[in-house]
Amino acid sequence: MPPKNARGAAKPPGKRVAAEHTLTRRRGAPAGDATKELLTLCIDIGGTGIKMILANAKGRPVTERARMLTPRPARPAAVAAVMKKMIAAYPRFDRVSVGFPGVVVDGVVRTAVNLGEKLWVDQPLQREVERFCRVPVRVINDADLQGYGVVDGRGAELVLTLGTGLGSALFLNGQLVPNLELGHHPLKKDKTYEDRVRDSELKRLGKKAWSRRVIEALETLNRIFNPRVIHLGGGNTEHLRGKLPRNVRLFGNVDGMTGGVKLWTNR
């Protein structure tokens, strides 16, 4: 049985401060001030939860991971309200990286299967987050962001996340192939990868039967992409049972989220 993922604590870091106070401090160090460390707020918007962590310039967490439930229905305004509430706990950051569960092009949402497609299509998410954070923001697919945090930068590397759905990212020598969305590709009996291994199937089938499906998907993807490594993360990896392919490497939620730092240096 593979080891459980490393998880951060669910509580937000530090004492909550008034939102208007954080807005005045959030811009970071003044120009030419080398005494303050560059801090990146890394945000992961998921179908079940919204997570945040603050990381330094080396990609190391400087706070615990915060988590709140994703509102239902996950309307853009409702998701933004949760994000604002969580952000109020952070006294200072210099930039924001956001991972979103869908296709994102130039900061604009194109698909959002697990949040409500019609609610999100053509939403300028990057611009909206910049508006209430008042710092530079970059928004990409959530698995793409997590991939930046775990890939080695050598050869073909596939990143998969098991959660509400199935996130996926492909890197070649450290370069991202954006918006792969492999989870929505057909796999078996007119079902997609995500149809077969999503969280609802774990609950319906149980851990053993669901794990067999995950292993089958991994073996299929190995034959298609022949990746040097498959990086496997997401909250549901802790439920896996059985022997995984030899090139599968598990990673924790915090490891993936810190990819938000590399997002600013690899694009």
Image (cartoon, rainbow, N blue to C red):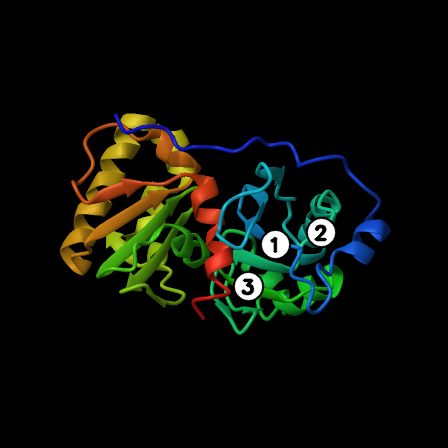
Q: Is residue 267 visible?
A: yes
Q: Which residue is mark 1?
A: 39
Nearer the observer: mark 3 or 2; the answer is 2
Which is more toward the observer, 183 or 19? Answer: 19
| Residue 176 found in image quarter | bottom left
Kind of residue indicated by mark 2: Arg
| Residue count near mark 2 (Cα–Cα under 10 Å), binned few <14, some 14–19, many ≥20 | many
Placement of 35 over or under 264, stated as above or below = above
Kind of residue indicated by mark 1: Leu
Q: Which residue is mark 3?
A: 139
- Disc 1, disc 2: CB below 8 Å? yes
Placement of 228 over or under 235, stated as above or below = below
What count of labels does the image hold?
Answer: 3
Quick check: 199 left or right of 261?
left
- Disc 3, disc 2: CB below 8 Å? no
Q: Which residue is mark 2?
A: 92
Residue visible at 16% across and 40% down in the picture: 246
Residue visible at 17% across and 46% down in the picture: 219
| Residue 77 found in image quarter | bottom right
Residue 228 x/y as whole percent: 19, 54
Q: Quick one: label 3 or label 1, which is nearer the N terminus?
A: 1
Residue visible at 64% across and 48% down in the picture: 73
